[in-house]
Amino acid sequence: AKAYANFDSAELATWKAGEPVPFLFLASTFEAIANQPKRLQMTQLLVTAFRTILATTPEDLLPAVYLCSNQVAPSHEGLELGIGDSILMKALCQATGKSMQKIKDDYAEAGDLGNVAAAARAKQKTMFKPKPLTVQGVFKAFQAIARTQGTKSQERKVDLINKLLVSSTDVEPGFIMRALQGKLRIGLGDETVRVALAHAQSLHRHGADNADGKLANRLETAVQAVKQAYSQCPSYDALIPALLQYPIEDLPDHVRFTPGVPVKPMLAKATTGIAEVLEKFTDQEFTCEYKYDGERAQVHYTEDGKVFIYSRNSENNTGKYPDIAAIVPSMVREGVKSMVLDCEAVAFERATGKILPFQVLSTRKRKDVEVADIKVQVCLFAFDCLYLNGAMLLQKPLTERRTALSQAVREKPGELQFALFKAHSYTSTDVEELGTFLNESVAAGTEGLIVKTMDSTYEPSRRSLHWLKLKKDYLEGVGDTLDVAVIGAWFGKGKRSGVFGAFLLAVYNPEGEEFQTISKIGTGFSEEQLKQFSEELRLHTIPTAKPYYRYSETLLPDIWFDAKTVWEVKCADFSISPRHKAALGLADPDKGISIRFPRLVKVRDDKTPEDATSAEQVAEMYFKQALTSGQQKGKQEDE
Ligand code: ATP
């Protein structure tokens, strides 16, 4: 709170109130944040920037927040940056007059196109001073670039980017390039942007005076309100105008969940087995639901009769499941005008009524599926109802949401079914009984159970203690799987020459926005798989490691990849490692955690690298293992 006290927004602004905020103001803030090692100070820099904008040109807050989040629209709209390097390099050639070869060489040396652009622009002599870029202008240009499609779209993109670059000065070109690549990565996660937003607005409205001793409380209330509002409706287009208009604590009432905009799904926590579940849920009523192995599908039915299906990451998946989208309206019960269901889409053999494994589902085309071409049938298993006829049910207990589910739709075998549960509502201390449920669920072709407390609300985007995973793997004593990003590889030898023989895996640390290595994986692949992965991964080759990769110089791969591919892997156990950097500082001050004997379970197309297992989760798994197996915490890697 002290840091906020002596703030004079007027002094910071180089523009007059009501005038467009210069992009250089934001880019300089990014630069200061990127150079600031301390998290708290990083956040404060952003708070100061937002406060300045609020005090001068509040209408520029929305584009500023989008630029900070490296987005051009809410994620369900599917409008993304992530412009390819070749387009960016072409634009840079045009803007600076340098040859492609020179840009390529510099890129190979610097490893970061932003730095190449900044250096090239700095050296360039210009005849006249370009008109300064504005936050609005850059944001609009980014949107236009992201929207450009069809023939000649490459040239048009190059042209738009060139225009931005020739007007850019100082630190601007670097951030423009990185943002266009979709990798701004100034070290602030999305959560931090929202915390800063809440602080800035609260301080702007109520000042930083702490005479009543309640400043910290006010800030915390603001943060909770912004977080709740955003999790109900993850769209800055809705959040920011409401933030500017209403008292901040009332935001959740004004930014409401509406069919057509996906909420971030509630996630479940891993457990080590039945004993842990029973211990956590002592004296609580819970239900054991089958855990289907397919793809998360949030099904929206809007008042105008439209159906939308959203993925775990809030991407619009309606084009992947036209068959489901067609079925839903006929399953809706009479009188139901709008609803949102949380479901798992699972590959299903209708003739035999058999649930098929995820591998079968993953053979389905990802986009623009034609109903006539569909070979893999899908059954929707619905397990939650988040909205019904205008009523938002997120804050209601599971008991009520389950009732709402049965009021919303009818079941039709093989097309839409309710997720099976054992015992509607139930308290137990019986290990055997739960074990029997688990065995039954596995025999039915599912992955195990998700055990949920009956009085829990729906907690969007939260990995909640009220939903516990009990997977069949636990029966084999292997523990939960991890989702890891593939960031490097070693060339194969002998029989495997020509393809990669081993890969470097990393988890993600959202706190510092970095990928931390956790293991090398080289066994258990078929030759066919190695060939396919090598072909796919080669497309993501980068000249050097990204600045946000944490790895050891003693374990350098032959080739680096841009983190794109996510694999789900199983492992034998976790150990403290001098060579890997996962969860660095969380279990040991200087060492990371590694996994032993990793083995590929499946490719996770539905996850982005930022959805990989987090550093914190790795540390949790490590500590849990130490507890359950009685091993000492300090166990060292023994390879
Ligand atoms: P997470 O989504 O938790 O990051 P993950 O994608 O690796 O992890 P799992 O660990 O397999 O998934 O388990 C959670 C997922 O299980 C949910 O996201 C959902 O898609 C799926 N699921 C299947 N059946 C259910 C159910 N009855 N209730 C809730 N989720 C279910």
Image (cartoon, helix red, strand yellow):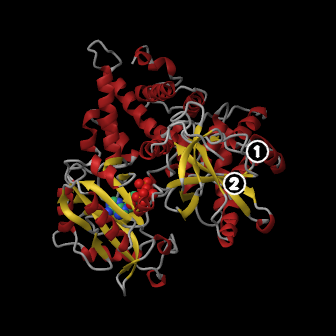
Asked if disc 1 and disc 2 are in contact, CB closer than 8 Å, the reply is: no
The image quarter containing residue 436 is bottom left
Q: Pick out the residue farthest to the bottom.
A: 351
- As helix, strand or loop, the secondary structure at mark 2 comes to helix
Q: Which residue is mark 1?
A: 107
Query: Crowdedness of circle 2 by 10 Å Cα count: few (<14), some, many (20+)?
Result: some
Q: Quadrant of ligand 1?
A: bottom left
Q: Is residue 262 visible?
A: no
Q: Residue at x 34, y 40 (%)?
A: 227
Task: Name the mark nearer the viewer: 1 or 2.
Answer: 1
- As helix, strand or loop, the secondary structure at mark 1 comes to helix
Disc with the residue nearer the chain's start (1 vs 2): 2
Q: Residue 231 location, x and y as percent?
A: 34, 46
Label at residue 87: 2
Query: Crowdedness of circle 1 by 10 Å Cα count: few (<14), some, many (20+)?
Result: many
- Quarter containing the N terminus: top left
Q: Residue at x 49, y 83 (%)?
A: 373
The image quarter containing residue 37 is top right
Q: Nearer the viewer, residue 186 or 174?
A: 186
Give, as a three-letter code, the residue at label 2. Answer: Ile
